[in-house]
Image: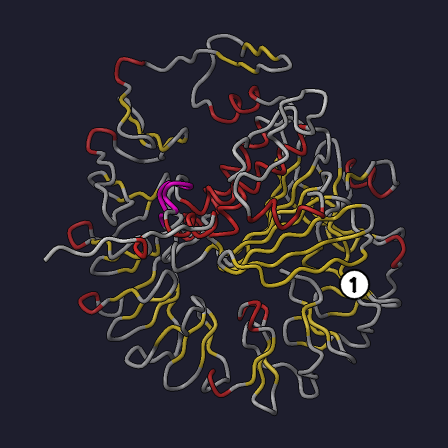
Amino acid sequence: MQQDYNDSNIRTLSGLEHIRHRPGMYIGTLGDGSSIDDGIYILLKEVMDNSIDEFKMNAGSRIEVNVEDGKRISVRDYGRGIPQGKLIECVSEPKTSAKFESDKTKKVFKNSIGMNGVGIKAVTALSSRFVVSSYRDGKVRTAVFERGILKNDVTEPTDEENGTFIFFEPDDTKFLNYHFHDDNLESMMQMYSYVNVGLTIKLNEKQFVSHRGLEDLFQDRMTSDALYPIIHIKGSDIDIAFTHTCQDPSTFKVLNEHYATDMHHVWFNDNIIEGAEPTTFVIPNGGISNLAHDAHDYYMGNQPLHVADMGSFRQIDENWALDSLYVYYLDVDVLADKKAVSVGDSRTFKALNGFYAVDAKCVYYKNNIVKGADPASFAVLKGQYRYGQDRHRVYYEAYGSKIRNFNALRHKNMEDGIYNAFHTDGKTVYNPELMAMPVGTDFLTIHKVELFRNWYADSKHVYYENRLLPGANPKTFVIFPSHYVNADYVSDNNKNADYSHDDSHVYYRDSLMSDVDIASFVCGYDFVVEKSFAFDKSRYYEGTPNPRIEKLRQGKYQVVK
C-alpha cells in the first residue's frame, strides 16, 4: 500500500533545530575527542576564531581557556565584547553576523576567520549548556542556553574589562563518551599562537605565545637541521616561511594524515616516536581502534603503551585496552606516567564509560583500581561520568566517600552539574568531590569561592577542600592572582591554586601563614625555569630569587592584564 504524502509530512526547522538534526553538515565528524578532527574541537575552534578576530582588530591581546574534567570549556577574551543589544541573535540565529558588511569604510572586522554567520550558533545548538557573557562599558549581559533553548537572560553592572566570556559543555547525547584531550588542546593553542604573533593564550596553567610566528613553528617542529637559515616573508596579507632539512626523502613514506616513516624513524604528526620500529610499523585500522603498533609495542599518537603481552593484547573501545597482565587507559597524559594497572580478570573485563570499567574482581577508574568497590553492584551515576555507586557507598573518581546512597541526599546547584553541587543528608554537608565538610558547615550558604579552585565559603567560614581555614573571614576572602613570568613579560589573568587571603591573613591552601605582608605579597609561576614562587617585600616563601623574579619584586615589569 502506498504511503500518504501530504502537507503534514513537511517540516520547517529553525536554524538551531537544523544544526541539532544534521550536525555533520556544520562540524563534520562527531567523534569522541581522541582525534583533533573530532567535532568537540570544531566547537572550540568556532569560539576561539571569534576571539582571534578581536585580536586581529587590535582589540585584546590575550585569551584565557579553561578546561574542567575534560568535559567543559570556557573562553574569555578581552576584545570589544559582542554588542549587547544583539547578543542573543549573535549566538542563536544563523546568518547573523557583523562580518557581512561590504562597505570597507564601515567594516568592524577587516580580517576575519569566520565569514558565514553560522559558527558560534553550532556551539549553542550542540551544547547541553551554553553561557555567553558580553562585558561592555560597565555592564555585562549574560544569556544561558540548554541544547539551543534560551533559559535565562540578565544584564547587570560589572567592573570587569570589556570582552566576551563563553562557557560550553558539549551535548553528551550527540558526542558519546567524549573527552577533551590535553595533547589535542595544546596543539590547537600552540598553532593559534604561531599564526597570531603577540597573542597570549593561556590554557589552564599553560601559556602559549609566539614572537616570531612561523619561524618559531619551524624551530619547534623540525626534526633535523636546516640546510640554510629559515626564509620568512611577511606582509600585511601574506606570511610565508620555508627551508630544507637534511632528511633522506627517498625512504620517506606518508602512511596516513598522522603517521609517516623513513628508514630510521616513525613520526606522529611532526614528532618522532621514540623506539618505534619503522619496518614493522602498522597504522590504526579504523573502527574502534585508534592505536598503531609495531612488532613489540602499541602506540597512542606518539605515546607508547609499554604492552607486557603483545599476544593477548586487545582494545576494548577508544578508552580501554588490556592484555593478560595489565589494563591500559588510553589517554596520552595518563600513558605518559607509565603507570600500569594489574588486571583482575581479563576474561570478564567490561568498560562502563570513558572513565570507569569493571571485571569480576576489580573496579577501575582510568589507571587506578577503586579500592573497596564491589564490581558486582557498581554502576556509574546517571549522566555523571566521574561518579559511581555500589551497595556500600558513592565514589568520586577513584575515591570512596562516606555517602551510602546518592539519591537519598538533598542537593544544591545540581542544575550547574554535580561538579559545582553540594549535598547533605541532614547532618553532614558534602562538597563537589563528595568530601564530608566540617561539622557546622551551613548548607544554605555554602558555595565555591572561585570556579575551578578548591576553596569554599559559607556565611561564617572558609574551607579548603573539606578543611576549615582558621580565622578566615568569608566576607573579605579572595584568591591571589597568579603571576605568570616569561622571559620578557608577566601576566596575572588567572587565580592562583595555592595562595589566598582575607583582610588580615594569608593562607597556603588550608594553612595559615605567619607575618606575611598582604599588600606586597606576589605569587605565581616562572615558565622559564618551570617553578612556582611566592614572596613579599621581606622574604621568599616559595622558590628562589632570579633576575626575572627580582625584577617583578622591584615593580620593574609591566604586568599584562
> Quadrant location of residue 152?
bottom right
Give residue 220's position: percent from left, percent from top.
52, 26
For the point 46% across and 43% down, the residue is 41
Task: Look at the image and say whether residue 28 sits in the magenta stretch.
Answer: yes
Give residue 254's position: percent from left, percent from top.
28, 24
From this viewpoint, is residue 347 visible?
Answer: yes
Give residue 178's position: percent from left, percent from top.
40, 54
* Residue 143 vs residue 534, the one in the foreground: 143
Q: Residues within 10 Å of mark 1 (few under 14, many from 20)?
A: some
Is residue 531 depicted above or below 433 in this figure? Answer: above
- Quadrant for the C terminus, please: top right
Is residue 185 depicted above or below 438 in this figure? Answer: above
Give residue 369's position: percent from left, percent from top.
37, 69
* Residue 38 vs residue 124, the one in the foreground: 124
For the point 57% across and 16% down, the residue is 239
> Quadrant location of residue 429?
bottom right
Task: Give the magenta range.
Answer: 23-31
Task: Look at the image and say whether residue 392 sits in the magenta stretch.
Answer: no
Residue at numbered disc 1: 478
Q: Amino acid at mark 1?
A: Val
For the point 79% across and 51% down, the residue is 160
For the point 36% across and 40% down, the residue is 301
- Quadrant for the N terminus, please: bottom left
